[in-house]
Image (cartoon, helix red, strand yellow):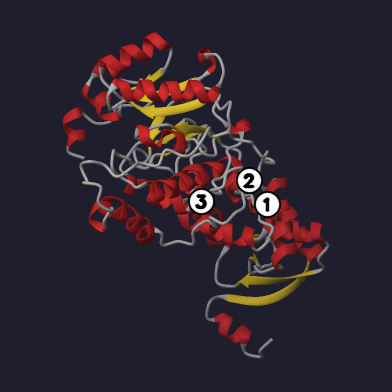
Amino acid sequence: MEPDLNQKLAAYGMRLEFWKVSDLQELVKKTKNPKKHFNKDIDALVSSIDDLGFKSAVYINKDATEIGAGVGRIMASARRGMDELPVFRILDLDKIKFKKFRIADNRINQLSNKWDDDVLLSDLRELANDQENIEWMYFSQFDKILSSEDAVEVANYDLDLGGPLPFAQPSQELGGRPVTNADLQPHQTIQQTREAETAEEPEDLSVDFSSSNDWGIPDLDLRFQSSGVHLPFVKWGEISYKKVMNGTWHFYVDDPKFDRIASDPTPALRSMPTDLVELNFSTSEFLPPPALAIGDIFFKRWVSRFWQSKGFNVIVDLNVHPRFRKMNLIGVPEGWKAYATRGSGELEFVMGDWQTACDHAGCDESDIIFIVYGGGKQIRETAQSKGWHWIPERMAVTGDPSLAGLDGLDIKVSPGQYQDL
């Protein structure tokens, strides 16, 4: 210790000393500490000392008769079998001020009990990836997300696609000419947005999930599919993903709004949803070309398989243009029973999705979970007659009081306000 250290500390009203832990324990008995300690936090302090060493100090009053801060640290150190601890003796506070110091030390930490979960999760992921033990910090809400192990062993499913994939032929509208960059612009914008918005370290898309197809698209696991419709049924971005939401996330929104999820799927798990509908990349009669569509199918299925690996249930998205229906099922094992689609198009499209679900599930229609999000009166009545689960779009709910609550969310703004958001 530097000879003048305590001279410098005197300017702060403190003196550094080293005390036997056994003597400090006697002071603990004499101290009326308003802060209660339990085995859980003492165990965490012991783990912290084991992991990081003793990196704090104990504070006592000028008469050395009371503990001002560090009761828990003393208890943990005694349990740890330590002999000596650094102690700061507070020299410039009288009895009343010292009592105030003790209360303030315990209270101030509680006043700011908010975390930046994005930064925290990033740091915890880095620690977990480096094999650091973080269990004693009790961030159990992130256990599934941070787990480095697959939740299940993936079976190799033998899919019979029944012939070649339905690659689209050059259309009459394009005159049979080759597809140009101008034709691809909408899709390229999505890809560019995906790259630009991914500022954080992305999940490793090379994780080797089992695949039974030549494209390497991961096979979903039948054991992690939805068993029912769990409300609220929430579109991504409608509410904060940082709050617990024991319902279902869906991604029937503009592609750029969920592009980051394709690179880092973990934010969608932060709210601990019961189910997640797969990502829904936009398709149309002409776009994207099959070569790019297969890439989107890889992304949506890889993300779904990642969610399953963390123990979350998945609902297969069927909302693609009919020319991509067969391709869209690559990686979905036969016998899968949980599906969702969007009802905003023609009834003919929705009926086609229903038939696709029935054919692929290969079971009684009553055993299939088929969710239709949105659609007009005709689609709603068809859903009711066939036993589908019809859920109105959020805009419809805010504009029609008779639909209130059908998506499981409260209406917090008036229709007029919502339209201006």
Amino acid type at mark 1:
Glu
- Labels 2 and 1: the sequence-earlier one: 1
Q: Which residue is mark 2?
A: 210
Tag 2–tag 1 contact (CB < 8 Å): no
As drawn, 119 above or below 373: below
In this picture, residue 75 sits left or right of residue 292: right
* Quarter that holds the N terminus: bottom right
Residue at x 32%, y 49% (from the top left corner): 256
- Element at label 1: helix
Residue 135 marker: 1
x, y percentage for residue 291? 40, 50
Asked which quadrant contains residue 68, the reply is bottom right
As drawn, 251 above or below 383: below
* Quarter that holds the C terminus: top left
Amino acid type at mark 2:
Ser
Q: CA distance from mark 1 to mark 3?
A: 22 Å
Front position in the image: 105 or 66? 105
Asked which quadrant contains residue 58, the reply is bottom right
Residue at x 56%, y 17% (from the top left corner): 363
Front position in the image: 180 or 88? 180
Q: Residue furthest top?
A: 385
Q: Which residue is mark 3?
A: 110
As drawn, 213 above or below 71: above
